[in-house]
Amino acid sequence: MPDSQPWQPDDHAADAAGATGSPDTAAPAGLVLCGARLTDGRVVDVRLGGGRIEAVGTAGSLAAPGPRLDLRGYLLLPAPAEPHAHSDTALTADDAGPGVPGPASHRPEDIRRRVPGPASHRPEDIRRRATEAALLQLGHGATALRSHVRIGDVQGLAPLEAVLQAGRSLRGLADLTPVAVPRLLTGVAGAGNLAMLRDAVKMGAGAVGGCPDLDPDPAGYAEAVLEVAAEQGCPVDLHTDSDDPARLGRLAAMAGGLRAGVSLGPCAGLSRLPPQAAARAADQLAAAGVTVVCLPQGGCCGVEGRGTAPVRLLRAAGVRVAAGSGALRDLANPVGRGDPLEAAYLLASQHGLPAAEAYEAVSSAARTAMGLPGVRVEAGFPAELLAVRGEQLPGVLSLACSRVVVHRGRVVARTSAVREYCDSETVVALGLPRQGRTDSGSCGGP
């Protein structure tokens, strides 16, 4: 439930929240998060320093000079991460052209006819959108983001450079890592893109990817991406619907030897396969050590099918399943929120995962898929944390309105929600927060 009172930090917490100074300002020495509840029910103080958790003790036990932050009434969690964003196309839904079908049309043949509108591809506009999108997702709690960025064709490497610049401008607030995504890689048409993919890694792309399903030679596309990844020692993150068991099996076999790690997503086509075929595919993915990044909130550009991967089947087979947001208010999902907690909520409400497993998909599993160190609310772990108003994880996933986000030991974002009711006998009897009263006794306040 939203707060009955606006969020108020203790003395000096404004400095801890980064209200003054540049984004690169070092975390305050000895910042203490006071009175937070953990998922095991304990109420604790947590001291942060040097970008890590220095100590966790019972409430009131960690005295330290410097800023303190009152988190009574909040549940403290490892911060989620976003393993599947599209920063270059984010926030372009309002620019959709007349080729977009009506709201009742979700057939694959209609989705194929959707065409981009006049969204700007100028590097400065991509940089602005990528920065704004990352900050929106940071406000939700995602302190690390992996963004798929299209390269090649007319734009070349300019979109990648724009997203890299956005990442540099966000230093100290969030970590933004781009994945280089060429359209074609095989044949004469793909030769230039293959060279460009190698250049993208040298520029700073953190992973290589793309959509083999859209190439005339899907197996050749996947092989080319894996070859570049092996050369450069970087991970692979591929878009695929995974509705072809034979193709998926070959991809899993090729991916098995890549030490840097391979992720596939959104793999919604697995849900449309016969049960036995889907189970065999899940076993192959598990044997290859491939991570599946599902998108419970909707699809993304480059993948035509709707739906979500069969997360329970995959987990039962031993496949690591992470959950991402996909499209953030672009043509593929004009109402995408980019909220990791909504993704976890959907995994719990629509796919039957326990709340803890659903949150794991957007936190520890997502971080592992991105090659990031694990986070637990224990001494020695990175200070990447999310505090949400609530007492238990199911309630937090149900209504996560007020949030405090910690990145590298600093409070970098906060959201405060206040719910108040019109004055009435029922409200008074239940002790609910009331709006300000006017002289006439009618509802007052905003």
Image: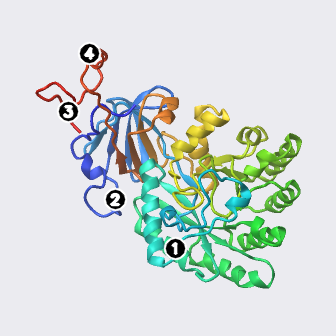
Three-letter code, disc 2 = Ala
The count of marks equals 4
Task: Residue at 78%, 48% (x, y): give it.
Answer: 270
Q: CA distance from mark 4 to mark 2?
A: 50 Å
* Mark 1 Cα shell of 10 Å, populated few (<14), some (14-19), many (≥20): few
Three-letter code, disc 1 = Pro
The residue singled out by tag 2 in the image is 26
**Residue 30 versus residue 372: which sits nearer the camera?**
372
* Marked residue nearer the N-terminal end (4 or 3): 4
* Marked residue nearer the N-terminal end (1 or 4): 1
Q: What is the number of the mark on residue 184?
A: none
View extreme (left): residue: 439
Q: Residue 246 vs residue 18: left or right?
A: right
Percent across and percent down for residue 389 are 39, 35
Q: Secondary structure at mark 2?
A: loop
The residue singled out by tag 1 in the image is 118
Q: Is residue 60 above or below residue 251?
A: above
Percent across and percent down for residue 324 are 59, 51
Three-letter code, disc 4 = Glu
The residue singled out by tag 4 in the image is 425
Q: CA distance from mark 1 to mark 3?
A: 44 Å
User: Closer to us: mark 2 or mark 3?
Assistant: 3
Q: CA distance from mark 4 to mark 3?
A: 16 Å
The residue singled out by tag 3 in the image is 444
CB contact under 8 Å: marks 2 and 3: no
* Marked residue nearer the N-terminal end (2 or 1): 2
